[in-house]
Image (cartoon, rainbow, N blue to C red):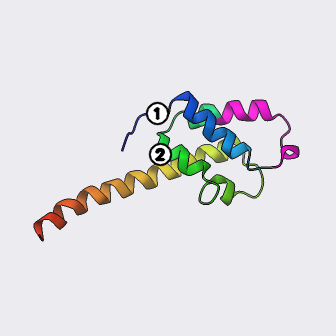
Amino acid sequence: MDCGRADPIAAKEAAKAIVGSYRARDFVDPDTYLIGLIANLAQFPVVVIKLAADPVHGIPRKYKFVPSVAEVADELAALSARIRLAATGARRAIPAQSKNH
């Protein structure tokens, strides 16, 4: 898993996907919100931001109303932690499986 940060283009696309999932009238200042969203998304790996932007399992599915930038940042951190935990578990399981074969 690439643990580096997403490039700005990937962050912008994820932000647009999240923003596009909500009604336009719910935004007081959509440009400022988008800037904040992109800045936060860009701090995480692409896998995290793609999961966050997913309309079925991500932020658009979890929040009925537009989440604050802080709520999005919290979701990104939680997703990142879950992915790291799963990766650690997978790395530990692989040697155990290879011993059984």
Please tell me which residue is depicted at 24% across the width and 59% down the height of the picture. 92
Q: Is residue 79 left or right of residue 55?
A: left
Task: Kindly report which numbered mark, 2 or 1, lies closer to the viewer in this rendering.
Answer: 2
Please tell me which residue is depicted at 58% across the width and 49% down the height of the picture. 52
Please tell me which residue is depicted at 22% across the width and 60% down the height of the picture. 94
- Which residue position is annotated with label 2? 47
Which amino acid is tagged 1? Arg
Q: Which residues are magenta?
A: 23-37
Q: Position of residue 67 (x, y in %)?
A: 72, 48
Which type of secondary structure does the marked residue at label 1 adopt? Answer: loop
- Which residue position is annotated with label 1? 5
Q: Is residue 78 left or right of residue 20?
A: left
Please tell me which residue is depicted at 50% across the width and 46% down the height of the picture. 48
Which type of secondary structure does the marked residue at label 2 adopt? Answer: helix
Which amino acid is tagged 2? Val
Q: Specify whether residue 11 is painted magenta.
A: no
**Looking at the image, is 62 positioned above or below residue 70?**
below
Q: Specify whether residue 32 is painted magenta.
A: yes
Residue farthest toward the right in the current orientation of the protein: 25
Q: Tell me if mark 1 has few (under 14), some (14-19) or many (20+) residues whose alpha carbon lies within 10 angstroms of its own.
A: some
